[in-house]
């Protein structure tokens, strides 16, 4: 019975986590996320069950797997101060977890998570072309090989933000539901 329950839970987790991860990877050229230590998060006994139920670790593993499979860049960034730093001016704006709006003296006012997402993207773009950032590239014979991103790709990512200034300012490009 124990094996059946475990098998059922693993199948449920697979369907719950792998499909959204695949969708995220297929619809983006670069996926950036916080390098959260799930072990440390579950030390908070009030949140432990919710965090474990969410399958964050498995979701990250599926992101990395599908990133490799489809030749997309996945970057885990340091989570320190992503929601505290102002995405516009860089000023540290201390706030409690219950404060849901980021308001800075520079005039930037965003949802706390939106501000953090912009900071995560900026950190990720700052690492493109450095150690740990790679893509799958077809070589001369057509086989896929793992390649560290070079300066050509850094320029490409740089031009992406130049062509789409909304990407860096935090404006929505499309409505996410």
Image (cartoon, rainbow, N blue to C red):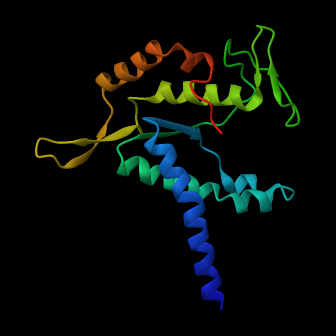
Instruction: Locate residue 18, reporting x and y percent.
Output: 52, 58
Q: Residue at x 72, y 22 (%)?
A: 85
- The answer to which image quadrant residue 13 occupies is bottom right
Task: Count up the numbered dots.
Answer: 0
Q: Residue at x 39, y 41 (%)?
A: 72
Residue 173 visible from this viewpoint: yes
Instruction: Locate residue 121, reporting x and y percent.
Output: 56, 28
- The answer to which image quadrant residue 95 occupies is top right
Q: Residue at x 46, y 35 (%)?
A: 30
Q: Residue at x 23, y 48 (%)?
A: 144
Instruction: Locate residue 6, reporting x and y percent.
Output: 62, 80
- The answer to which image quadrant residue 123 occupies is top right
Residue in front for this viewpoint, 99 or 148: 99
Q: Residue furthest top?
A: 106
- Classify 19 as above or below 89: below
Image quadrant in which the C terminus is located: top right
Q: Residue furthest bottom?
A: 1
- Classify 76 as above or below 104: below
Query: Horizontally, is 144 left or right of 25 in the view?
Result: left
Residue 81 visible from this viewpoint: no
Instruction: Locate residue 135, reporting x and y percent.
Output: 34, 40
Image quadrant in which the N terminus is located: bottom right
Query: Horizontally, is 88 left or right of 24 in the view?
Result: right
């Amino acid at each position: 019975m124990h094996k059946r329950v475990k098998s059922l839970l693993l199948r449920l987790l697979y369907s719950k986590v792998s499909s959204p991860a695949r969708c995220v990877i297929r619809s983006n050229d670069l996926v950036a996320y916080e390098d959260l230590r799930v072990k440390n998060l579950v030390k908070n006994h009030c949140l432990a069950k919710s965090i474990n139920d969410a399958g964050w670790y498995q979701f990250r593993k599926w992101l990395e797997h599908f990133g490799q499979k489809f030749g997309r860049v996945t970057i885990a960034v340091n989570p320190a101060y992503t929601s505290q730093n102002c995405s516009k001016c860089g000023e540290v704006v201390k706030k409690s977890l219950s404060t849901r709006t980021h308001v800075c003296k520079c005039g930037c006012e965003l949802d706390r998570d939106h501000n953090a997402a912009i900071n995560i993207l900026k950190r990720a773009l700052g690492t493109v072309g450095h150690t740990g950032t790679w893509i799958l590239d077809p070589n001369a014979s057509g086989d896929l090989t793992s390649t560290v991103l070079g300066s050509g790709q850094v320029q490409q990512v740089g031009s992406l933000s130049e062509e789409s200034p909304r990407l860096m300012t935090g404006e929505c490009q499309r409505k996410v539901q």
